[in-house]
Amino acid sequence: MLIIDDILFGPLKGIIFLAEKINEVIEKETSDEGAVKERLMALQLKFEMDEIDEEEYDKREDELLKTLERIRADKINK
């Protein structure tokens, strides 16, 4: 039965593995203060180069600043 289980559940195990790796990358990206700061700088550059309008800039900036605040609060609480 183990060989049949491996054949049947192998693809599922692969999908689970990929999902876990994707989750790790997302967690790292959203919990790394340096990465968020880089995204803020890139956003500011896009705004200054007129690639996005002020409304879009403000919306994204607010999201990134909230993420940054959450990261800093998490560091304090640890």
Image (tube, rainbow, N blue to C red):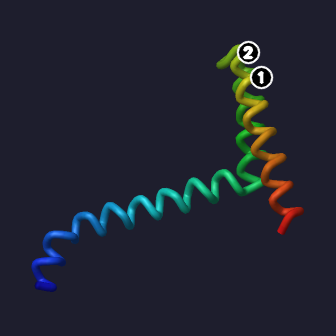
| Residue at 64% over, 53% down | 29
Residue 63 x %, y %: 73, 34
| Residue at screen point 77% across, 31% down | 61
Q: Locate residue 72 relative to residue 2 in the image: left or right.
A: right
Q: Residue furthest bottom?
A: 2
Label annotation for residue 27: none
**Horizontally, is 51 left or right of 24 in the view?**
right
Residue position for label 1: 58
Residue at 86% over, 64% down? 77
The amino acid on which the numbered mark 1 sits, given as a three-letter code, is Asp
Above/below status of 10 relative to 72: below
Q: Give the side of residue 18 with respect to residue 44, left or right.
A: left
* Image quadrant in which you'd find residue 3: bottom left
Location of the C terminus by quadrant is bottom right
Picture layout, residue 1 above or below residue 72: below
Q: Residue at x 72, y 57 (%)?
A: 32
Q: Which mark is residue 55?
A: 2
Is 40 or 24 nearer to us in this picture? Answer: 24
The x, y position of residue 60, in whole percent, is 71, 29
SS type, badge 1: helix
